[in-house]
Image (spheres, helix red, strand yellow):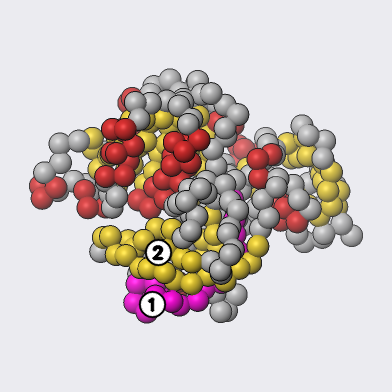
Amino acid sequence: MPFQITIQPSGHVYNAPEGETVLRAGLAEGFNLPYSCRNGACGSCKGRVLEGRVDQGEYTPTVLSDAERDAGYALFCCARPLTDLVIEVREIGAAKDIVVRKIPCRVQSIEKVTHDVVILKLKLPANDRLVFLAGQYVEFILKDGQRRAFSIANAPHDDELMELHIRHVPGGVFTDHVFERMKERDILRMEAPLGSFFLREDSEKPIVFVASGTGFAPIKSIVQHAIRRGISRPMTIYWGARKRSDIYLPDVPATWAQENPHIRYVPVLSEPGPECAWTGRTGFVHQAVMADFPDLSGHQVYACGVPIMVNSARTDFTTRCGLPADEFYADSFTTSADSPQAQAGAGSASNT
């Protein structure tokens, strides 16, 4: 028997088949609820259950605290209705006309930019284009049905080739293949576009972008889109990495800042060795943001990267810097090791 779910404050209503998650059921009926990882590791889909009961499912405990559970919050990518529900969650209006498709693509080029990062460029079938929002991601569908998600790094207007930034995760099913066996002209199958990490263009608030590692990819897409659109809101881009060579496209954000007076770029290294000859910022990237912006109450933040950075930024920015919780937008790059199933000793997730 399906359960009826009512979304507040919009008042929209949809049905969830028994055993289906709140998120998947909503997406299937065309309601654009916020999400990213879809495996309980990032917190982007967090919302409140106002009425009814849910099975919370498996998720990473640091993403949903006991206090939040007691207050009625749930991760809708994991939570399954046990009764009819009334939920409180922000719907994503800008994605309503985007069609998610399963499409083949061909490997156009594989460029190794560091020892563990490649820039993969893909070609869609002739006369075909993918309509997407800057910041969204694709999921590759592997032969055994597993999926691996990667953010689109090119802006929508520059869509002749699709650009992905892929970091090697040793032992990862997909990234081992990319680094060891993938060749130009190989055919891949993907579903796209996915995700709710994109620029909210209806706001005039200054923006802080926070990236760790290849979390720079969707931020690159968003900033290039904003420049193309003539959006002149103040933007500060923080890119965190362990050492200097991990900032694999240093000239790209530096050029944005040089050519656009409203853009500032701040690279941050957590473990710069003597060989780096580094004179810039050091430490954790989200702490550099807090040092520069002790008051974020009038800003929007877009954070992308490893879960520990995203979760730390979400917590510290909202509790210590006054950032409104609904002005924090995130895309968390989870791997098989980050999934609740793996942490419990079971299967795999994405991005490996």
* Residue 184 is one of the magenta-drawn residues: yes
Residue 276 lies, with reference to residue 72, above or below; the image says below
Q: Could you tell me residue 328's position as x and y percent?
A: 53, 34
The residue nearer to you, when weighing 252 against 91, is: 252
Tell me which amino acid carries mark 1. Lys
The answer to whether 28 is drawn above or below residue 276 in the figure is: below
Q: Is residue 60 visible?
A: no
Count of numbered circles in the view: 2
**Quick one: label 1 or label 2, which is nearer the N terminus?**
2
The disc at residue 270 is none
Residue 250, percent from left and from top: 27, 46
Which residue is under mark 2? 120
Q: Is residue 83 left or right of residue 229?
A: right
Residue 16 x, y percent position in the rendering: 81, 55
221 magenta-colored: no
Q: Quadrant of residue 1?
A: bottom right
Residue depicted at 70% across the width and 47% down the height:
97
Residue 97 appears left or right of 35: right
| Vertical side of 222 occupied by 106: above or below | below
What's the residue type where badge 2 is placed? Leu
Q: Report the disc number at residue 183.
A: 1
Q: CA distance from mark 1 to mark 2?
A: 11 Å
User: What range is drawn magenta here?
Assistant: 175-195
